């Protein structure tokens, strides 16, 4: 009997993998978009208290003393902490109609790093494709005015099938004090590339396609202390809902992908900053 259920589950998985990405197109509806906007607004309202002198700048600072001490120890040992979040407020829910809100926060520690050396690397949007491949296949700065940037990223995702997205963002940088800096990256346009074999080719209309990514906001925080830099990223994204009848099978897979992407992005950022520092030291020694 157990073997029967295993075979049945595997058959369902193969069927879903074949049918879900190809036969079931999705369209972003206004009610879905509006519900996500409300969720974003409620989430960003929390930042007002955090992004002020004395605020809980890093999410682990709001933990009880024992949990906070353990989290800092884990970070200093090189671990990447990633947790699922949910904003709760009157009239706001992560359960949006015809969509799924993905809300995660992750944190790393980069030993020996400083803000002065870290920030130029993460602000170099022309290098995002180099830093975050294969998830980012092309990147460039569109405009820059003081603390405000506009950037373009082509995102490459291999989920149930391969998809590419042309995405643009408004990015604003700010600081709480000399040791605490933050940036908010808000997606302004996400369009799926029609043929992933031709990433520079034709796009599908915005809000159509597979529905694997409709919106993406990332909120970054950098704090220099303890002989290094703590880097936190809170990510909010919106994707299509799971087709009726396949939720039990596909939802664990779909909801784990943003977590994996965040974990990978944080790890790659730390590696790049440490490698840049190593290269600088080598150059200094040569001189």
Image (spheres, rainbow, N blue to C red):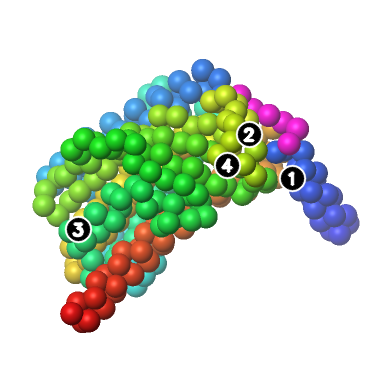
On residue 81, the disc is none
Which class describes the residues within 10 Å of circle 3: few (<14), some (14-19), or many (20+)? some
Residue under numbered circle 2: 194
Mark positioned earlier in the residue sequence (1 or 2): 1
Q: CA distance from mark 1 to mark 3?
A: 44 Å
Which structural element holds mark 1? helix
**Number of the front mark, 1 or 4:** 4
Which class describes the residues within 10 Å of circle 2: few (<14), some (14-19), or many (20+)? some
Mark positioned earlier in the residue sequence (2 or 4): 2
**Residue 7 at least partly seen:** yes
Task: Please tell me whether residue 147 belongs to the stretch shown in magenta.
Answer: no
x, y (%) of residue 42? 34, 29
Residue under numbered circle 1: 17
x, y (%) of residue 253? 62, 48
Residue under numbered circle 4: 199
Q: CA distance from mark 4 to mark 3?
A: 35 Å
Which class describes the residues within 10 Å of circle 1: few (<14), some (14-19), or many (20+)? some
For the view shown, which residue lies furthest in the top direction?
30
Residue under numbered circle 3: 115
**Number of the front mark, 3 or 2:** 2
- The stretch of residues the image draws in magenta is 22-27
| Above/below status of 280 relative to 205 | below
Kindly indicate whether the residue at mark 4 contacts the one at mark 2 (C-beta within 8 angstroms). no
Q: Quadrant of the N terminus?
A: bottom right
Nearer-the-camera pick, 81 or 146: 146
């Amino acid at each position: 009997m157990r073997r029967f259920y295993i075979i049945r589950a595997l058959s369902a998985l193969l069927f879903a993998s074949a049918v879900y990405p190809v036969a079931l197109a999705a369209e972003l509806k206004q009610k879905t978009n509006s519900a996500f906007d409300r969720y974003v607004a409620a989430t960003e309202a929390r930042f007002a208290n955090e992004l002020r002198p004395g605020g809980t700048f890093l999410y682990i600072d709001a933990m009880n003393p024992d949990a906070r001490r353990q989290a800092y120890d884990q970070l200093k040992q090189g671990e990447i902490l990633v947790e699922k979040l949910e904003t709760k407020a009157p009239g706001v829910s992560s359960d949006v109609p015809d969509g799924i809100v993905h809300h995660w926060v992750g944190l790393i520690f980069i030993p020996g790093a400083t803000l002065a050396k870290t920030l130029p690397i993460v602000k170099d949007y022309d290098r995002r494709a180099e830093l975050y491949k294969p998830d980012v296949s092309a990147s460039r700065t569109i405009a820059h005015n003081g603390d405000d940037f506009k950037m373009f990223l082509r995102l490459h995702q291999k989920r149930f099938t391969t998809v590419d997205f042309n995405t643009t963002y408004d990015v604003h940088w700010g600081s709480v004090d000399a040791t605490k800096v933050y940036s908010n990256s808000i997606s302004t346009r996400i369009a799926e590339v029609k043929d992933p074999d031709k990433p520079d080719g034709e796009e599908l209309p915005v809000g159509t396609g597979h529905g694997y990514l409709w919106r993406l906001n990332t909120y970054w925080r950098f704090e220099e202390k303890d002989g290094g830099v703590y880097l936190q990223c809170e990510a909010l994204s919106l994707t299509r809902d799971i087709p009726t009848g396949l939720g039990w099978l596909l939802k664990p897979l779909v909801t784990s992908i943003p977590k994996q992407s965040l974990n990978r992005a944080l790890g790659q950022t730390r590696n790049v900053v440490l490698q840049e520092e190593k290269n600088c030291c080598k150059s200094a020694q040569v001189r």
